[in-house]
Image (cartoon, rainbow, N blue to C red):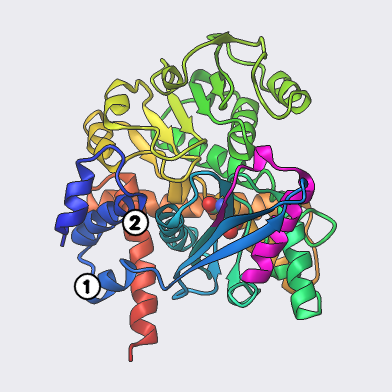
């Protein structure tokens, strides 16, 4: 059931991101034998909202920003997914990311559908006051879309606990009450969960260890390169090195560093904290090019920054045996077959970075109970859930003789198909 549009886009290095979702969906649907009536539902997001947000800037002038929220599916529960602030945010990106959330939540076995939102802006160039006004204007504009049992945002690129606190505040004011469960990733102390901030990086670590075990590799004898030093990359690098993995390369948008003996990750974290969250000027390694990190001579590659970084060309030069996708959509569809032919195991984004949304779910559960768990409880529930999801996908990979990526899609499709069929039609 591969359609002409997506087949054409597969050939491209960087086509529409939503087409990249459909390309994988089509392959998985064919291998699994998904019924066409389910496939057509999944090819179209349920709801797409676009809002204009006029904000008073610090200079007294009004600027109008574009805000987006796409709800891809609510078949398995209220829709869940982050909010991204960045200059690349657009309809296509948000749509693709919303579909990935549907599949990610299903792979992680959470009672959620998928959504994603964003605002086209450059948060690095805005003051805290401007960002607060923008976040609150966005929340008010989407107050009838969001809701603890309807659609639940969370942090994504360019946003964090601070923005989530602003969202809950604006939402509470619209509905005149207290609704901590309307958003996850809040600061601890106002309904946030312990362990949420580090959860995505922790999930990457757990998935990496699970994959190494299957590959019969000892964590203490392998090396890794981690692209990205934001919330996901930083915590992944920190936790991987804590497990004895030698992290030889790290990088962010300001600098990429290599050290064959292993980078001192704690020192890198301290440096970044003191330098506006950037690595430029860190002397714990020699500077290399951004793309050299992806093709570095290491066993494990963790792309935890942007989408579309592993192109077909880059894939041909990758030396790692294992790729664990911390970012959403780091590999373009055209690179999939190259990685497969080279025998590289790819733990796909919808599994590898599902630790974040898993602990978001725990936060939401704690909010509705009004009872809060210890960090150890959260981490241990997270690790169990991540290992189960990994095992499930691994088994499907063997059963369907596919890649792990396609097996993850199949795992999700089975659950969503059940939901669509059980709920019936009209
Ligand atoms: N933005 C994160 C993701 O892409 C977290 C989403 C959530 O917790 O709802 O998975």
Residue 409's tag is 2
165 with respect to 120 (left or right): right
Residue drawn at point x = 45 percent, y = 26 percent: 300
Residue occupied by mark 1: 35
Q: Report the Cα–Cα distance between label 1 and label 2.
A: 14 Å
In the displayed structure, 46 sits above or below 343; it is below
The picture quadrant where one finds residue 95 is bottom left
Residue drawn at point x = 60 percent, y = 29 percent: 237
Q: Residue furthest bottom?
A: 426
Of the pair 116 and 327, the residue shown nearer to us: 116
In the displayed structure, 207 sits above or below 249; it is below
- Principal secondary structure, stretch drawn in magenta: helix
Residue drawn at point x = 49 percent, y = 36 percent: 208
The quadrant where ligand 1 appears is bottom right
Residue 268 location in percent, x, y? Answer: 69, 21
In the displayed structure, 351 sits above or below 70; it is above
Q: Is mark 2 within 8 Å of ligand 1?
A: no
In the displayed structure, 95 sits above or below 246; it is below
194 with respect to 417 (left or right): right
Q: Is residue 82 visible?
A: no
Q: Residue furthest right?
A: 189
The answer to whether the residue labelled 1 contacts the one labelled 2, judged by CB atoms less than 8 Å apart, is: no
**Residue 133 belongs to the span the image colors magenta:** yes
Of the pair 365 and 36, the residue shown nearer to us: 36
The C terminus lies in which quarter of the figure?
A: bottom left
Of the pair 232 and 64, the residue shown nearer to us: 64
Residue 40 location in percent, x, y? Answer: 26, 71
Residue 78 location in percent, x, y? Answer: 55, 73
Q: Which region shows up in magenta?
A: 118-141
Count the numbered circles shown: 2
Q: Secondary structure at mark 2?
A: helix
Residue 69 location in percent, x, y? Answer: 52, 64
């Amino acid at each position: 059931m591969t359609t002409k549009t997506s087949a054409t886009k597969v050939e491209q290095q960087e086509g529409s991101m939503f087409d990249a979702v459909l390309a994988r969906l089509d392959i998985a649907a064919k291998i699994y034998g998904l019924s066409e009536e389910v496939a057509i539902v999944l090819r179209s997001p349920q709801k797409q909202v676009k809002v204009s947000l006029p904000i008073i800037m610090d200079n007294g002038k009004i600027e109008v920003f574009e805000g987006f929220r796409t709800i891809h599916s609510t078949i398995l529960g209220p829709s869940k997914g982050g909010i991204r602030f960045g200059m690349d945010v657009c309809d296509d990106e948000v749509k693709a990311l919303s579909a990935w959330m549907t599949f990610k939540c299903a792979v992680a076995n959470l009672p959620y559908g998928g959504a994603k939102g964003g605002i086209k802006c450059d948060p690095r160039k805005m003051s805290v006051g401007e960002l607060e006004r923008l976040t609150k204007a966005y929340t008010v504009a989407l107050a009838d879309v969001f809701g603890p049992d309807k659609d639940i945002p969370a942090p994504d690129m360019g946003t964090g606990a601070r923005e989530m606190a602003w969202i809950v505040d604006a939402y509470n004011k619209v509905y005149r009450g207290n609704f901590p469960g309307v958003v996850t990733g809040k600061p601890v102390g106002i309904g946030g969960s312990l362990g949420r901030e580090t959860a995505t990086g922790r999930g990457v670590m757990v998935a990496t260890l699970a994959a190494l075990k299957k590959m019969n590799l000892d964590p203490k004898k392998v090396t890794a390169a981690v692209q990205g030093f934001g919330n996901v990359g930083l915590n992944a690098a920190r936790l991987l090195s804590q497990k004895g993995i030698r992290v030889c390369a790290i990088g962010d948008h300001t600098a990429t560093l290599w050290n064959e003996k292993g980078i001192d990750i704690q020192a890198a974290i301290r440096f970044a904290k003191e330098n506006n969250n950037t690595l430029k000027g860190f002397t714990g390694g020699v500077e290399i090019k951004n793309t050299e990190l992806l093709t570095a001579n290491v066993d494990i590659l963790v792309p935890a920054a942007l989408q579309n970084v592993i192109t077909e060309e880059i894939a041909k030069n990758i030396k790692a045996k294992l790729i664990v996708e911390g970012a959403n959509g780091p590999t373009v569809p055209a690179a999939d077959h190259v990685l497969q032919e080279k025998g590289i195991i790819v733990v796909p984004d919808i599994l590898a970075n599902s630790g974040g949304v898993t602990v978001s779910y725990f936060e939401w559960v704690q909010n509705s109970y009004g009872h809060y768990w210890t960090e150890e409880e959260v981490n241990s529930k997270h690790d169990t859930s991540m290992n189960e999801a990994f095992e499930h996908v691994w088994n499907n990979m063997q059963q369907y003789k596919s890649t792990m990526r396609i097996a993850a899609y199949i795992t999700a499709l089975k659950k969503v198909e059940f939901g669509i069929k059980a709920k019936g039609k009209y």
